[in-house]
Image (cartoon, rainbow, N blue to C red):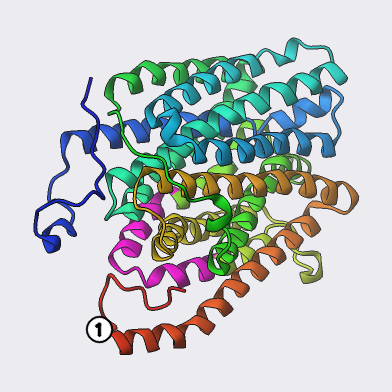
Amino acid sequence: MDPPLADPQQPDESNPSESADPPSRMSRQQILTVISMASVNFSSMICYSILGPFFPNEAVKKGASQATVGLIFGCYAICNLIGSLVLGKYIVQIGAKFMLVSGLFVSSCCTILFGLLDRAPAGASFITLCFIIRSVDALGFAAAMTSSFAVSAKVFPNNIATVLGSLEIFTGLGLILGPPIGGWFYQSFGYEVPFLLLGCVLMCMVPFNIYILPTFDASPSKDSFFRLFSHVKIVLICFLMFNLSAGLGFLDATLSIFAVKTFSLSTGYVGLIMVGLSLPYCLASPLLGFITDKFPATRSWFMVLGGIATAVGFCLLGPMPVLHIPSRLWLLVFMLGVIGFSLGMTAIPIFPEILTCAYDHGFEEGLSTLGMVSGLFGAVWSMGMFYGPIMGGLITQHLNFQWAAAIQGGLGCVAALLLGVYYLCQRPQQQRVVQENGIRPSDERTPLLDG
């Protein structure tokens, strides 16, 4: 058993200029933490993403409407939202390691149980069991991911975006491999095999992380989510993040049905199309994380420009009916790639930007604040994942996929523009502060546009 990991933010007697720089080599505990977080991200996301290619059609066969399918995806998000807030607040009391390991165990059990739902009677019984299992699974996922974000930021306080961006490789791999593996196993062996196989893989991650993950000690904080969410900058960033996750939730519930009807694709090929969304995100995230750590001032415009690019991608996904462009498979795949890359531009800087804002407004540096920021991140993301499938399913059912995607893109564009206007309004004030304090504008550790 590894000894408890000391808080990297605690003062010591070393030279401050030296302690501010990251070490040239990672310690053993840092290496083990990276391995642990990578395994959590990969195994959790591959189990989460296998539903997209085949579950919506399977649920429709079992008597669920398009709107009900959206609700099944949405209930996962709303339970994740509640779990992220509660667990993020009490991460110190529960224990980061216990929270992560228990979350993995719950998610693995629920994944296996979800694979047995094809034996349930069609209609109300099937739908009710879907809601129950997905809701419990969401709580386990919230525990694992909230702890993962907080632990990563605690162990690497000076390189948060770089580490999170690098870990997103494994998140992306899970998202990339989940749809095609799920689609192909479903097509070859039926409904049960994808869930049973990947649920067992996730179960294997439990003893693995018990063995390698260090124990973390910290003190509870008196700060609250209300105080964290009382700043305009954080509200606008959260609104942008909400629209990003809503877009992904929308695609989960509607893209497979649209692709099958429009292009007559098999389930396996639908899963392959979804790789077009995950692969650019996976490849771009480490570089984007490194850039935003090296040059913090770029975080602001990465988020704004990424949000606008995501909106354009959604408008051309169908494409938008008023453009009078016929639906083409190559265009659909290309726009998914645009959305995936721009998602990385926007999502990677969000966590360090919120954390920096919290520290600037007097929040204590330590695991407690990291847990709250992680919980807020997970809650807002889950709120979007709740809204996206439900509203996307309703709009698609009453209009069509093209209009639903365009509306989703329009909301994302509004969120990005609002954040951009805020940064523009704050820039003169920030420049005055820089001049009054005599700080060089070129200082890489002083974001010029922070509010």
Can you give x and y, in whole percent of width and height, for residue 393 in the image? Answer: 80, 45
Residue 241 visible in the snapshot:
yes
Does residue 178 appear left or right of residue 249 in this picture? left
The residue that appears at 46% across and 70% down in the rendered structure is 300
- Residue displayed at 47% across by 58% down: 350
Q: Is residue 364 above or below residue 93?
A: below
| Residue 56 quadrant | top right
Membership of 146 in magenta stretch? no
- Residue at the farthest right position: 398
Horizontal and vertical percent for residue 267?
66, 32
Q: Which residue is mark 1?
A: 440
Is any atom of residue 180 visible in this view? Answer: no
Of 232 and 416, nearer the camera is 232
**Residue 321 place in picture, x, y as percent:** 81, 65
Q: Which residues are magenta?
A: 282-306
**Above or below: residue 236 compared with residue 32:** below
Who is closer to the viewer here, 379 or 289?
A: 379
